[in-house]
Amino acid sequence: MISVDRAGPADLDVLAVLFDAYRRFYRQPADIEGARAFLRERLENDESVIFVARLDGEPVGFTQLYPLFSSVRMRRTWLLNDLYVAESARRHGVASALLDAARHHGNATGAHELTLQTGRDNKTAQAAYRKNGWIRQDAFYWYGFELES
């Protein structure tokens, strides 16, 4: 059975492990303490909304949403920035449950839309998004400018 709940400070240790695995998926070095500190700051400062998924009571995935605003629509939007499901829990509906929680949250907060980006080569994620009603947007180009840190 899959359950999805909004994460809070009590979920920090579980989230740090999942977040670290997510980052390693994107070829980043393991850093549990950095993951914990990053997530703690997001939660303490109310800078993101995180949902944690459990499969038969075991934490197996999460999604993290960041608030944005549409000036044209004069409404909130949510950036679904992170979505991760542990390899052992894939193909059990966990990603769909997390996407559903994000959609419910967007509706509950009166948001105009949810948006996300994924790599062109991440065919698995693209299939999951399409399966859950997400539509690839081709009307706009996305640009990035990496700042010096």
Image: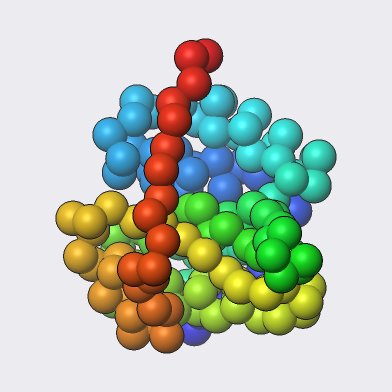
Which residue occupies 53% across, 60% down?
80
Taking the view exactly as shown, the residue that stands out farthest to the top is 149
Q: Nearer the viewer, residue 22 or 122?
A: 122
- Pinpoint residue 31: horizontal percent, then vertical percent: 45, 26
Q: Against 68, is 73 above or below? A: below
Image vertical order of residue 29 relative to residue 47, above or below: above
Q: How is the image coloured?
A: rainbow
**Measured along the vertical axis of the image, is residue 19 above or below residue 69?**
above
Residue 49 appears anywhere in the view: no
- Nearest the eye: 54 or 101: 101
Q: Is residue 39 visible?
A: yes
Task: Please name the residue shown 75% across and 53% down the image.
Answer: 8
Residue displayed at 62% across by 32% down: 38
Horizontal relation, residue 82 to residue 13: left or right: left
Residue 15 vs residue 47: left or right? left
Where residue 77 sits in the image (x, y, percent)? Answer: 66, 64
The answer to whether residue 30 is left or right of residue 72 is left
To which quarter of the image does residue 50 belong?
A: bottom right
Q: Is residue 94 above or below residue 66?
A: below
* 2 sits left or right of 10 in the view: left
Where is residue 21 shown, x and y percent of the image?
A: 39, 43
Q: Position of residue 2 (x, y in %)?
A: 51, 79
The total number of labels drawn is 0
Q: Residue at x 57, y 58 (%)?
A: 79
